[in-house]
Amino acid sequence: MTSPRASTGSQAPSRAVGVVVIGGGQAGLATSYWLRRAGIDHVVLDDAEQPGGAWARMWPSLHAFSPPQYSSLPGWLMPGWTGEGAFPSRAHVEEYLRAYEERYEVPVQRPVRVEAVRHGDGERLVVDGHRLVDGSPDGRAVSWAARAVVSATGTWSRPFWPSVPGMREFRGVQIHSADYRGPDSLPPGRVLVVGGGNTGAQLAAELTASHEVVWATRRAPRFMPPEVDGRVLFDVATARRAALDAGREDDGGVAALGDIVQVPEVRRSLAEGRLGAVPMVERLTASGAVWGAAPGEAPDGSTWNHPPAAAGEEFSLDAVVWCTGYRAALGHLHPLGLRGAAGRVPVAQGSMTRAAGEPRLHLMGYGDWAGPASATLIGVGRPARSAVREIADLLG
């Protein structure tokens, strides 16, 4: 379909479109599915050269948290997984997302780097960016004028690095889990893995087969029961949201079950005694790490292992892997002036995804604050459908 052009003054000419979806990962695909079902003209802008979203950028040994039937986007179940264990591999998920994009003829344009969303003329939001081309670091300026925008940029492009004394002095290798591609990403020897979530546990478990691993966490890790997977987490998150919306007491949701899913590699490492956490280091040195006084038992009874060195003594290290999470990639929304606490965009009361200060903007797939379990394959379909219903009402 050929769209009319909308003038934006000194900016590059903008193509008028009903909805712009920023991001071609799982959240963007789910949104496009429902927009297509509703017959709403839209375009999906993705900064990657290939399909797959964040899954295409993760470490090769990663697996989903659920069987295929509970790791699917709306409309089409993920094909069955025939590899080891019940949970599909990263490559299997990536191929599913590629095929999903093709199956539903998602109107994706890539690679397009979106730099700003701003108020345009009339009732439109203008999305400015650059179409990246070979041999050019900046590409060609492009722009769309949309009646609604769905931001589905995820978190992968904003890895969070904590501030730990001595980080700048450490002479070994330091990488964030975003850049981890397997044991070969690191030099031989001792590795400190920092982070008490699923990524920290999975990378520590994998590295125990090739390195001497010290896994450090800020609180003692709590492993979920072996039978808990992504399906259970989705059900719990959904029930929690319903309870909160009804004014009932918060039961803690997923957090009440624990912090870490026992995927096969983690479960094996626990059973073999290869995986155990120690308290967080007090500081790094040029060649290692130093721990402070050992903390006591946590209120829930969970405990750490003893640090590998006495308090105040240096323990030599060859590398550090920071599994310290990500932040929502929302820098492109800065011109709208909507950022609130913790760098998030506040969501309107009664909506899962609509921005409180801009009814033409929806936030998709960033975590529970933008819809229960919205950062998961199984969970993102519901907030995407809700957002499209609101967008359809807005467009009339």
Image (cartoon, rainbow, N blue to C red):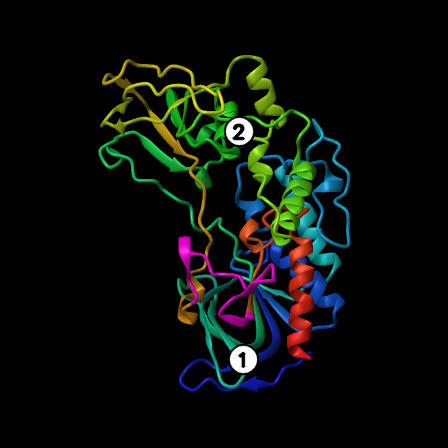
Image coords of residue 204 (percent x, y) = 48, 25
Residue at left 70%, top 47%? 96
Mark 2 or 1 closer to N-term? 1
- Amino acid type indicated by mark 1: Arg
Q: Is residue 51 visible?
A: no
Residue at left 49%, top 33%? 197
Q: Is residue 281 visible?
A: yes
Instruction: Report how far apart the C-alphas of labels 2 and 1 lie in the structure.
Output: 44 Å
Indicate yes or no whether the magenta region holds residue 205. no
Rendered position, 162 above or below 184:
below
Residue at left 22%, top 28%? 286
Q: Which residues are magenta?
A: 338-360
- Amino acid type indicated by mark 2: Gln
Decide which of 266, 99 is in the foreground and name it: 266
Give the side of residue 51 with respect to residue 154, left or right.
right
Secondary structure predominantly adopted by residues drawn in magenta: loop
Indicate yes or no whether the magenta region holds residue 342. yes
Q: Which mark is residue 202?
A: 2
Quarter location, residue 152: bottom right
Image coords of residue 259 (percent x, y) = 53, 32
Give the side of residue 257 with respect to residue 166, left or right.
right
Please state which of the two labelled residues, at mark 2 or mark 1, is closer to the viewer. 1
Query: What residue is pinned by disc 1?
Result: 124
Image coords of residue 239 (percent x, y) = 67, 45
Decide which of 388, 359 is in the foreground and name it: 359
Are circles 2 and 1 on residues that touch, CB within 8 Å?
Answer: no
Rendered position, 91 above or below 371:
above
Decide which of 150, 259 is in the foreground and name it: 259
Q: Which mark is residue 114?
A: none
